[in-house]
Image: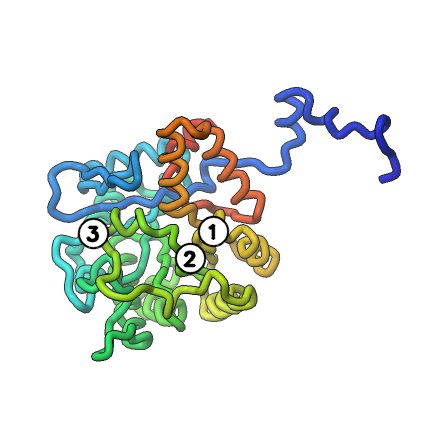
Amino acid sequence: MNARYPVARPRRLRRTAAMRRMVAGTRLHPAEFILPVFVKEGIAEPQPVGSMPGVVQHTRESLRKAAHEAAEAGVGGIILFGVPAHKDARGSGADDPDGIVQVALRDLAADLGDALVLMTDTCLDEYTDHGHCGLLTADGEVDNDATLERYASAAVAQAAAGSQMIAPSGMMDGQVEAIRAALDGNGFAEIPILAYAAKYASGFYGPFRDAAECAPQFGDRSAYQQDPAGPVGEALREVRLDLAEGADAVMVKPALAYLDILRQVRDLVEVPVAAYQVSGEYAMVEAAAANGWIDRERVIMESLVAIRRAGADMILTYWATEVARALS
C-alpha cells in the first residue's frame, strides 16, 4: 500500500458501530462454546464454588436445568466433571456404571437428545484419593501404562452412558490410542475423541481443583503436564502424536496465556481446535469486576474474541450460556 496520511485514514472503517460490525474479522457464535459443569454425588442442593463466583457443584436435578438452559441459549456442548462421594487409589468411580458422571449422562441423554453435544472429561484425578491423574507406583510416581487401562475403561463406560465425545485430559503417553482401541472394540467406533493435546502444568487451575475437589495430596502434575517454559516444539509434537493415535480434534489448555501455542496448533492441523478458558482466567475477571476495576461484560467478550482470533474453533468457557444469550 502506497497511500499515506492524509489520503490513508484507517479510522474511516471504525467510525460507527455498524461499520465496525460489517468489517469485523472475528465473530463469536454460541455453537462454538462448550460449558464445563461439575456434578457432585450425594448433595441435596447445588454447592457454590467459593473461588468461582457463579459456578456451582450441581446436583443431578440442577445439572439438568443448567443443561436445558445451555441448549436453549444455543451452546454447542457441555463437558461433565464428576465429584464422587467415595474416592480410592484406582479411581473406581471413573468407570462405575452407577458413578455420578455415568448417571448424569443418562439423565441428560434422555432429556436433550441431540440438542447439544454431551462431552466427558476422561481422567482419574477427580476420582482418586491422592488427586493424581493416574495409578501410582510404590514410589509414588504415576504409572503411565497401567493408567491407560483405566482411561480406556472409563471412556467405554462414558460412551455406554451417553457421552457423545470423549475428552482425555490426563496427558499420559498413548492415551488417545488406548481409548480409541477400547471404543472401537466395544461398539463405539462412531464416538469422537477431543484430545487435551497441549495441556500445561499451569497455576491457572487452582479454582477448578476447588470445584472438582481434585488437588494433588502430594507433589504436583509437572511430571506429566507440559512445562510452561518448555520448547514450543513439544506442544506440536504432542498434537501430532495424538492425531496419529486417532484424535478427531485437539485442545490447548489454558487459553489466554498460551495464545501463541494455539495459533501454531491451528496452523499445523486440519482438524477442529479447542481452547479451554480455565478456572483461573474466569476467577480473575470475576474478582476484578466485583471490585469495580474492570468492565466485566466487555472483558469477557474481549477475552473470548482473543481466543477465537488466535485460532480456536471451539472454546470451553464457564461463561458459555451467559455469552450465548448475549449474542442471541
Q: Residues within 10 Å of mark 2 (few under 14, many from 20)?
A: many
Give the SS element for disc 1: strand
- Looking at numbered disc 3 in the image, what kind of residue is underneath it? Val
Q: Position of residue 6 (x, y in %)?
A: 85, 26
Looking at marks 2 and 3 on the same chain, the residue that comes earlier in the sequence is marked by: 3
In the picture, measured across the screen, residue 239 lies left or right of residue 318, that is right
Looking at marks 2 and 1 on the same chain, the residue that comes earlier in the sequence is marked by: 2
> In the rendered image, which residue does mark 3 sit on?
83
Q: Position of residue 41 (x, y in %)?
A: 15, 48
Q: Is residue 97 visible?
A: yes
Residue 114 versus residue 324 in the image, above or below: below
Give the SS element for disc 2: strand
**Residue at 87% across, 34% down:** 3
Between label 2 and label 3, give the one nearer the viewer: 3
Residue 294 versus residue 135 in the image, above or below: above
Name the foreground residue: 292 vs 93. Answer: 292
Q: Residues within 10 Å of mark 1 (few under 14, many from 20)?
A: many
Give the SS element for disc 3: strand
Name the foreground residue: 233 vs 120. Answer: 233
Measured in 3D between alpha carbons, the distance from the residue under mark 1 to the one under mark 3, in whole angstroms, is 24 Å
Q: Position of residue 145 (x, y in %)?
A: 32, 77
> In the rendered image, which residue does mark 1 sit on?
274
Q: How many marks?
A: 3
- Looking at numbered disc 1 in the image, what kind of residue is underneath it? Ala
Measured in 3D between alpha carbons, the distance from the residue under mark 2 to the one under mark 1, in whole angstroms, is 8 Å
**Residue at 28% across, 72% down:** 147
> In the rendered image, which residue does mark 2 sit on?
194
Which part of the image, by quadrant, shows the N terminus?
top right
In the picture, measured across the screen, residue 90 lies left or right of residue 206, that is left
